[in-house]
Image: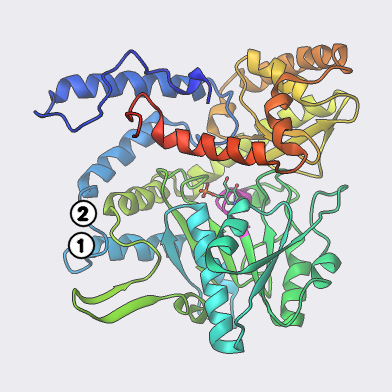
Amino acid sequence: MSNGYYPYTGRFEVNRTIPDHGRDRAEVLAELAQMASEEDGSWESGQISGSYYCGDHEHYDYMKDVFGLFAHVNALQRDVCPSATKFTGEIIAMTLDLLHAEAVTDGTPCGLVTSGGTGSILHALIAYRDHARQTRGITNPNIIKPETAHAAFDKGSHLFGIEIRRVAIDPDTATVRPADVAALIDENTVAIIGSACNYGYGTVDPIEELGALALERGVGLHVDGCLGGFILPWGRELGYDIPLFDFRVPGVTSISADTHKYGYGFKGSSVIAFRDTALRNSQYFYLTDWTGGKYCSPGMDGSTSNGLLAATWASLLDYGKDGFRRVAKEIFATAATMQDAVTSHAELRIIGTPTFCFSFTSDLFDIYHVNDFMKLRGWRFNGQQYPNAIHMAVTGPQTQPGVAEKFTADLDEAVTYAVERKDEPAGSAAIYGGVSGGLTDEADEFIRAVMADMMDHQQAVPPLG
Ligand SMILES: Cc1ncc(COP(=O)(O)O)c(C=O)c1O
């Protein structure tokens, strides 16, 4: 990792052991305030894709007050914190309402609050695996995902011994073709996946067709609304062309929707909503004959902070439907302005028909030239591959006055810069190119080293041995 990842080296004390004496709180707080304000400075300009979904410090301050009231409370112990039961039930109820669970006539809708998008996807996968084992006797389960569906599905398959079958997308629409999914379904398929919307391109898979397929073949359909679940409903209401993806679609058996993205909660919360309790309840683990007592927890986590539940609950109440609508209107309008800026350049091409999140590439030059230039102007996009593309998930910070205009102006210059270098390799593609051609031994080692460095960097950890 480059030095940019370690800006505190040499500036703040390095703690290699617990200090002998507790440090002065004011001094520690001052250090942290310095780090926080520097880090906030990186996104407050509105030039970072995704990540900081509301960007509203007043909302954050309010949630901090709420969090503080319950931060120390263990949400697992419901006898001493019945508020966790209230928060959980109401977060799930509000999410089910947004996802039109009232339309369900063939089940009893329910949910789980999890630690994030990955957490919701993992819980969905265990539920499909265990439900299929219990009801269909499947011991060798598989799921089918469009290649654009999030990597968390692959992670879950890896963790839970589920075979994952990937389907190439239609390059014209950047969505999956249901017939391609159908071709991979067999007697061990427990679920098929669709995204609303996918992370890479912001496109929505044809959920209604996938739902019909799921019903016809007797498999589950998980809709990944981690990114879009809390914003696409408002976009539909505003008249944007967003296909139906919620529980009104027959055959949709679960939907993940992240409260910590466009629900504007703190990081660490999401909802996995199920069409029916039978699916959710199939993944419960409990141990009644443990010497430590009878243990049961509804999901994978053990103890968690009730502060996060409280803050998530309070976030939904703070915005209210009118607040979510107001912010969504600004986000969709900003995304449209930015997409117009992209399409105004014949050299650039938007992939598929995106929403508030869009991705673009070029058939003339390596799009990473554009990334290189935009980086110099303070922009941070997410890079993609197959094909090389860059993506922007528009969030609250981009809706500030002047940000979309700066994007437009900087992009004009970036295209000129890229055209001039069209026969040269791009700078940011160099690192990325290391793994784009397939996973070599060197690339494997590099990736493992980067992950280890996130935890073991020498500024904090003494060399071993
Ligand atoms: C579509 C989609 N699904 C799942 C996830 C995973 O969410 P998390 O990072 O909260 O685990 C993301 C994250 O960006 C996403 O965009």
Does residue 302 appear left or right of residue 231 in this picture?
left
Residue under label 2: 73
In the image, what residue type sits under mark 2? Val
Residue under label 1: 81
Mark 1 vs 2: CB contact within 8 A: yes
Residue sticking out furthest to the left: 21
User: Which quadrant of the figure contains the C terminus?
Assistant: top left
Reading the chain from its start, which is encountered first: label 1 or label 2? 2
Q: Position of residue 146 (x, y in %)?
A: 74, 58
Is residue 97 visible in this depiction of the protein? no
Judge by depth and name the residue closer to the eye, 65 or 40: 40
Q: In the rendered image of this protein, does residue 49 appear above or below residue 13?
A: below
Q: In the rendered image of this protein, does residue 114 appear above or below residue 375?
A: below
Residue drawn 81% across and 55% down? 168
- Number of numbered discs overlaid on the protein picture: 2
Color style of the picture: rainbow
The residue tagged with tag 2: helix, strand or loop?
loop
Q: Position of residue 429 (x, y in %)?
A: 73, 26
Residue drawn 44% across and 31% down? 56
The span from disc 1 to disc 2 (Cα, nearest Å) is: 7 Å
Mark 2 lies within 8 Å of ligand 1 (Cβ measured): no
- Labels 1, 2: front one: 2
Q: Give the magenta range.
A: 224-234
